[in-house]
């Protein structure tokens, strides 16, 4: 019996579009209302800034330069905008020494097919897509998450979840309800739960599918105690928003 199925996948284009839309500020905020009775339509318009003032601060209208060379060739899917925070909900996976030993065998074999593959620095199992929150909504968003996931029990994760799938769907359902409250993108309709091991720029599915994945699966199946080392307790859910981390324990 296979210890844990290996999968090759690419990032979703629709997710990138959702991030870009949210970053541009086109999504409604929770509890938002239309312009109040008697409020002047001019009150929401920005007055032009005199050229003499603009010339005092050259380049301030542009966001910080995104140097992809500093991120392994990765490019932002949406431009940086002050006050908007990229947000992601996930379950952390604490890799054991045995897991890292397995990865040390898997990655070189995968790199014979896709040389540009890069090992992940940390490991997690996603419960949401990446969305954008306005800064003042971060704490209400996290509190709503805590309220939704407070009653969930812990379960197990591997490279790809082979047990406890229904429990993860329950968790995603709770996260999705919070996303809907804040008018944000929900998770995928038919999700596959997995822990990413490596990444590369571009779509390399054709190189990974077929012979490569079969060889990697054979390595996993043959690895000593692979079923045990790819199993762990999920004790908490985390929400990362910008450079802030919030933890919600699972009972």
Image (cartoon, helix red, strand yellow):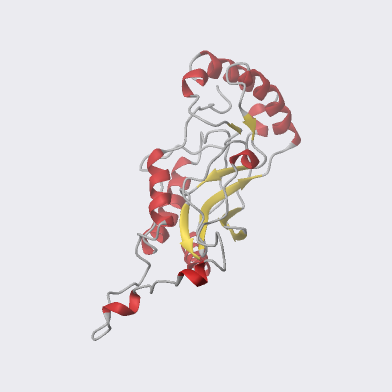
Dividing the picture into quadrants, the one containing residue 199 is top right
Say whether residue 100 is visible: yes
The residue located at (68%, 33%) in the rendering is 229
Asked whether 111 or 152 is in front, the reply is 111
Residue 89 at x, y = what percent?
52, 53
Asked whether 4 or 225 is in front, the reply is 4
Residue lying furthest top in this view?
211
Residue 244 at x, y = what percent?
61, 61
Residue 183 at x, y = what percent?
36, 60
Say whether residue 186 is visible: no
Residue 120 vertical placement versus 64 (above, below): above
**Figure quadrant of the C terminus:** bottom right
Along the horizontal axis of the image, is 172 left or right of 39? Answer: right
The residue located at (27%, 84%) in the rendering is 39
Residue 135 at x, y = what percent?
51, 67
Residue 96 vertical placement versus 53 (above, below): above
**Figure quadrant of the N terminus:** top right
Residue 229 vertical placement versus 107 (above, below): below
Dividing the picture into quadrants, the one containing residue 46 is bottom left
The residue located at (59%, 40%) in the rendering is 68
């Amino acid at each position: 019996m296979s210890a844990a199925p290996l999968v090759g996948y690419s990032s979703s284009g629709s997710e990138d579009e959702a991030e870009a839309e949210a970053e541009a500020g086109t999504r409604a905020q929770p509890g938002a209302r239309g312009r109040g009775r008697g409020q002047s339509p001019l009150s929401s318009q920005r007055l032009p800034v005199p050229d003499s003032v603009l010339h005092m601060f050259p380049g301030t209208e542009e966001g910080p330069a995104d140097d992809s060379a500093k991120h392994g060739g990765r490019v932002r899917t949406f431009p940086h905008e002050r006050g908007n925070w990229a947000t992601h909900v996930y379950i952390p996976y604490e890799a054991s020494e045995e897991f890292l030993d397995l990865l040390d065998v898997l990655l070189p074999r995968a790199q014979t097919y896709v040389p540009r593959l890069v090992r992940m620095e940390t490991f997690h199992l996603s419960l949401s897509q990446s969305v954008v929150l306005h800064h003042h909504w971060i704490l209400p968003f996290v509190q709503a998450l805590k309220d939704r996931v407070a009653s969930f029990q812990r379960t197990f994760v591997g490279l790809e979840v082979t047990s406890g799938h229904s429990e993860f769907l329950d968790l995603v359902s709770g996260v999705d309800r919070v996303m809907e409250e804040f008018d944000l993108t929900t998770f995928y309709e038919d999700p596959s739960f997995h822990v990413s091991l490596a990444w590369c720029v571009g779509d390399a599915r054709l190189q990974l599918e077929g012979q490569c994945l079969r060889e990697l699966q054979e390595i996993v199946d043959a690895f000593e105690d692979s079923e045990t080392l790819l199993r762990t307790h999920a004790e908490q859910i985390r929400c990362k928003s910008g450079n802030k981390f919030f933890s919600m324990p699972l009972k």
